[in-house]
Image (spheres, rainbow, N blue to C red):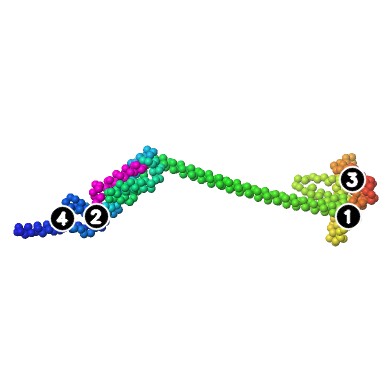
Amino acid sequence: MDPLLLVGLLIVLFVVFTVARSVRIVPQARARNVERLGRYHTTLKPGLNFVIPYIDRVYPMIDLREQVVSFRPQPVITEDNLVVEIDTVLYFQVTDPRAAAYEIANYIQAIEQLTVTTLRNVIGSMDLEMTLTSRDTINSQLRGVLDEATGKWGIRVNRVEIKAIDPPKTIKDAMEKQMRAERDKRAAILTAEGQRQSQILTAEGDKQSAILRAEGERSAAILKAQGQSQAIDEVFQAVHRNDPDPKLLAYQYLQVLPELAKGDSNTFWVIPSEVTSALQGVSKAFTEALPQSSATRQAPAVNEAAEREMAAAQRAAAEAVAEASEADIGPRQLGPGAPAATDPLAGLNEERPAAAVRRDGAGGTGGSTGGTGGSTGGTGANGTGDPAGPAGPGA
């Protein structure tokens, strides 16, 4: 090969290499420092830049965007002598490429160490409970200290975040037990409160129910008593208004007698001796003219229905007298020498008054009734109520 051609080729290559070294293209959000003859000359801006080759020295690019750096967990001792490991995340941005290159040798390492020391100072003045609940306070203190220290390095610290605070495992177990106990206590308190409210409401409901029930029973008892009082008063007034005589009472007595024989256990029933007296009095009451009472005198004439009822009552009284006579005669025909039956009501018949005197002065009717083993005489009424009357013959 021709030597001249080789020299020319070398010169061309040198020129191309020199031109290439004199042109620098910087991307956006980047910066490059330039030293001329070992001294800082300028900072290349984003875009096309020219430098003097072999005289100017261009340093590597510096990123001007916000950067995120996560530091490894650092052991920190709290005020109550507990060792916790804290992970931190740092957000920073280079604002002055010249200061970042010439004021500090390695700003990433410097920021990490400054973060660790500041974190230990801040955490050392807090106990574990405060450390776990005061992340915002710790972040603000760290950011203030780091921003002040890194300002002269051409770096701005935007945020410092605590990623994790890990206490020892024993402390974690104790905290879990404490939280479990707190929750159990709250659950027990809430359950007790609920039961108390339930019992109070139930007691109030029972109280209101008892009060209302008692008021209802009282009102019912009052109304019932008033009704009974009015009924008794009406009956009493009706009795005194109609002025009943002994014959009516005897008739009522005969009506009550069948009720005495009712019942499953009544297998034997003795007819008292005074039944015949009552039957005879009732028979005479229907056969003789009754004196009019004050209420009867004022009442209108008896209608046909009353007359039919009276006739039926007369027939029933006659039949009852016949049946009573047969029943009264039967026990006495026991045979010669048999003792006469003793009337348990004979004493009562003897103690009864011989005659009843009416209020209007009318005398009663005389009659005789044969008793069991004795006799009772009727009373002869002469208008003066003379109790002495002829005695009927005994059996």
Q: Secondary structure at mark 1?
A: loop
Q: Amino acid at mark 3?
A: Pro
Mark before the other along the chain sequence, 1 or 3: 1
Mark before the other along the chain sequence, 3 or 4: 4
C-alpha distance separating marks 3 and 2:
148 Å
Give the residue pinned by disc 3.
Answer: 353
Picture disc at residue 53: 4
C-alpha distance separating marks 4 and 1:
161 Å
Can you tell which of label 1 and label 2 is closer to the viewer?
2
| Viewport quadrant of the C terminus | top right
Q: Amino acid at mark 1?
A: Ser
Q: Secondary structure at mark 3?
A: loop
What count of labels does the image hold? Answer: 4
**Left or right placement of residue 135 versus residue 357 in this view:** left
The reply to whether the C-beta atoms of the residues labelled 4 and 1 are less than 8 Å apart is no
Can you tell which of label 3 and label 2 is closer to the viewer?
2
Picture disc at residue 31: 2
Residue span colored magenta = 97-123
Q: Percent position (x, y) of residue 271?
A: 83, 46
